[in-house]
Amino acid sequence: MVDLVPIPLGVLVTRLFRELAHKRSAFDLPQKFFVQATPGRDVSTTFHGRRVATPFGPAAGPHTQMAQNIVSSWLAGGRVIELKTVQIKDRLELSRPCIDIETVGFNVEWSQELTLEQSLEEYVKAAMLIEMLKAAGVVTGLDETVFDMSVGYDLAGIRSERVRAFMAGMMDASAVVERLRAEIPDEWAQYRDLAFPTRLSDTLTLSTFHGCPPEEIEKIAAFLLEEIGIDVVVKLNPTLLGRDQLTTLLRDKLGYTELSVPDTAFDKDATWAQVTGFVDRLGILAEALGRRFGVKFSNTLVVKNHKSFFSATEKEMYLSGPPLHPIAIALVDRFRAEFGDRFPISFSAGIDEGNFADTVALGLKPVTVCTNFLKPGGYRRGFRFFATLTAKMAAVGAADVDTYVIKAFGRADAALDRLGLARGRLAACRAALADGSDLRVAAGDAFEAWVSAARLENTAAYAAQVAASTRYAAAEHSTAPKKINSNLVLFDCLTCDKCIPVCPNDANFTFAIPPGETAIERLARTRDGWTAEPIGTLTFQKPRQIGTFADACNECGTCDVLCPEDGGPYLVKPLFFGSVAAFEDAPQRDGFVLEKTTAGVLMRGRFAGRAVRLEVPAEGTRVRYTGDGFDLTLDPADPAGTVEGTAEGTVDLGYFRVMEKILAAVTAPQAASFVSAALEQARPPG
C-alpha cells in the first residue's frame, strides 16, 4: 500500500498562485471552468439553517480528503463540502487499485487514508486557501460555504478521545490556523492576516455504512446532538428498499444482471420500520435541543466482487454512479410519502449534468457528486452542472432556487391545492404564475408552505419519470473507455491529458521538454583519459510529457482505467516525490526527488531500483553525476572532453540524460506543479 503525504501549506500556496499567474488555472482546473455567480440567478439555499451560495458539493470521498481536492471542488461550485469520513481506525491497510469507473462506479475504498490529525490539518488548509482565493477575487459572489464533517462507524470509536478531539478541532481550529499562518510564503504575506475561519464546521453527516445496527445509529446520532452539540444528518443505505424491490430494480429493470447484493447486507442493515422509527425519535430530540436533524440518500451499495480489477481478497465492492440514482430516488419518494417535508434530505447518487437541476428542483440539499467527477473532465464537470441549472431556471422564469422548485415540474397548481389557501390568496398565486410576477409577493406568508408542497409534488413526478427512464440502465453504461492497444512508456504518449483532470488529488501533471533527439554515450576510462561510445538516442516526439507527484498519488487506478494506452500513468510515467524522506520510504518505487543545496539543485533518481544522483550548480556548466561505482563531474555539452572523477567500469549516460531533461523541464520559469513549488519552498541544508 502507498501512503498519501499531506502537502505543506507553503507549497500549496506557491503552486496555486504561480499556476493562476502563469497558466490561468488552479490545481489543473482551467479558470474558465471556475463557477461564478450568474447575474439574475440566485442559486443559494440553506443547509441546517446556514446560508450556502449553491446547493452543490463534492460527496464525502476521494474529492474531499486533501486540501487541493477541496479547493478544486470549491472552484467547481461546491459550497457544501462533505468532508471525507474519518474514524478511529485511521491506519488501515487498503488494497490498490481501489476505484473502478470503467462503466458505472465501483470502489473498495471506504475510509480516510490520513490520520485524524492529518485530516484536521488538511481541512484547515483547504479553508485557508479558499479564503485566500476570495481575497484575490478569483471567484466573486458565491462566498457562503459550509464544511460538513463526516464520521463513522460505531459509537465506541466516535466517543473515543481522538475522534472527539478531531470534532473539537473542527469546531475550534484557531490553534491550527495560527500555526499555519506562518507557513504562508513571504511572496503572499498579504494573506497572512486574513480572518480565516476557526469554526470550520458544526454540522456532521453520520456514515452508518453497511452492517451498523439500527440501535447503534440512533445512539450515535443522539450522542452527537446532545453531547457534541452539532446538527446531524444520517446517511442511509440503499438496502432500505428491501431485498425484493432492490433486486428487481437493479437486476430485472435496470439490467445489471451481473451484480448481486450479499444476503448479509439485508440481514445486517436497518429495515424501513427501524429507520422510520429512529428518524422520528431523533427528529423530536433535535427539536427539543434546538438542533437540526436530517437524512441523506444514500451510501453506496455493497455488491459481490465479480470483477478482476480489484484484489482477489476483496470479496465485496461498493456500487455508485448511474444505477444508484433510481434506487436512491425511490427511497426519497418513499421517505417523503412517510414523513412529508418534515426532514431535510441531502442527496448523492448518480448525479450528472442531466439530472442535477431536477434533483435541485426536489428541494434536495445539498446535491453532491463523486463518481461523475471521476469521469473524463473531472472537476470541470461542475461548470456544466451550473450552466444547466441556470438555463432551466431561466426557462421557467425563476430567479432563485425556491421559485424554481415551485415552477420546475409544472406542479405549482397541484402544490397550491395542498395548502387550502383563502380564495383571494389562491387567485393571487395563480395570477402570478400566469403573468410571471413575483411568487413571494403573491403568496405572502404562505410562500414557504407552497415551496414545501412543491417539493412533494416534484418528488412524486420525478420518481415516476426516473422509474420509466432507460438512461440509468446497464445497456446505456456498458461501453468501456477505448483502448488503442499500445503500452505506455516513460516518455511520449498520446498526451490526451485525460489522466490529469480525473485524478481527484491532482497528482498527474504535464511538463514541457522540447521535441528532439539527444545522443546517449557510454563513458570509459582509458590509460590516456576517457573515451565516449555512442550507444543510443533519447528521443522526445511530443512537446509535453506526463508526470505524477507521488505524495498525492494513492494508486487508486482511475487514470489507468481512462488512459487509452495500457500500463497506467501512475505506474509508468516519471514519478516525483515531495521530499527525500518520502523518496527513501518507498524504495520499491522508481522515481525522482529534487532538493536545494547551497550550490544549486540535487536530483536523486531511481531506475529499476538503481539509485543515481545529479547535482546541478546555480552557476557554471559542470554538473556532478554519481551512482554505484562512479563519481563524475562533466559538462553536459561535451561529456567525453570534460569528464573528471572515478569509475569502476564504464558509465552509461542514459539515466543522466533523462534526469537532465526532466530537471530542466520541471524547474523552468513557467513551470507550475507541486514539484516546482516544493523545490521553491525547500531550504538548503545548513
Image: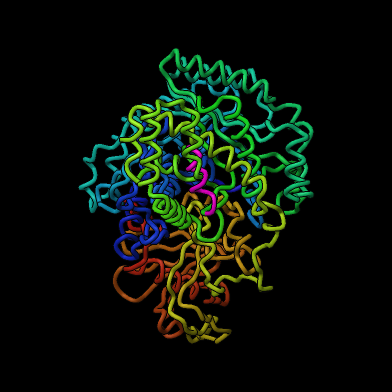
- Vertical placement of 216 versus 307: above or below? above
Residue 561 pos. (x, y %): 63, 60
Residue at (56% x, 74% y) in the render: 494
Residue 163 is at least partly visible in this image: no
* Residue found 61% across the figure and 39% down from its top: 329
Kindly identify the residue that appears in the image at 66 percent across and 56 percent down.
103
Relative to 147, residue 399 above or below: below
Which quadrant of the view contains residue 217?
top right
| Above/below status of 212 relative to 611 | above
Indicate yes or no whether the magenta region holds residue 357: yes
| Residue 226 colored in magenta in the image | no
The range drawn in magenta is: 354-364
Q: Residue at x 66, y 20 (%)?
A: 274
Q: Nearer the viewer, residue 445 or 310?
A: 445
Image coords of residue 220 (percent x, y): 56, 20
| Tally of marks | 0
Q: Nearer the viewer, residue 634 or 434?
A: 434
